[in-house]
Amino acid sequence: METKREAELILYIVSKEVSNCKVNFDLEDCDNILRVESEKCLDKDITDCMVKLGYICEKLD
């Protein structure tokens, strides 16, 4: 992730592509952690969306 603006664009796209979730980035972390809150499991949806945008994404436990 290069800029805060890039992060904002990704958050906008993910929130439009994957419904019923809250997303944000921890840009202070060197790995730019994307956090997702949802009542249902959206792992595949989030991962697919990020891959379409050209990013590597994996679930952290």
Image: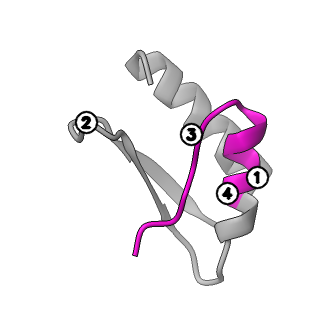
User: Cβ–Cβ below 8 Å for labels 1 and 4?
Assistant: yes
Q: Which contiguous range is marked in magenta?
A: 46-61
Numbered disc 1: secondary structure: helix
Which amino acid type is shown beneath numbered disc 2?
Cys
Q: Which residue position holds label 1?
A: 48
Query: CB under 8 Å between callouts 4 and 3?
Result: no
Identify the residue position indicated by label 4 in the image. 46
Name the element at disc 4: helix
Task: Give the residue drawn at x 59%, y 42%.
Answer: 56
How far apart marks 2 and 1 lie (CA) works out to 22 Å
Outermost residue to the left: 28
Taking the spot 59% from the left edge, 33% from the top edge, the residue there is: 10
What amino acid does circle 4 point to? Ile
Mark 4 burial class by Cα count in 10 Å: few <14, some 14-19, many 20+: many
Identify residue for label 2: 30
Residue 11: x and y in percent read: 56, 39
The circle drawn on residue 11 is 3
Spatial distance from mark 4 to mark 3, Cα to Cα?
11 Å
Q: Nearer the viewer, mark 3 or mark 2?
A: 2
Q: Quadrant of the C terminus?
A: bottom left
Q: Secondary structure at mark 2?
A: loop
Earlier in the chain: of badge 3 and badge 2, it is: 3
Task: Determine which quarter of the picture holds residue 39.
Answer: bottom right
Evaluate whether residue 20 shows in this view.
no
Q: Secondary structure at mark 3?
A: helix
Answer with mark 4 or mark 3, whichever residue precedes in sequence: 3
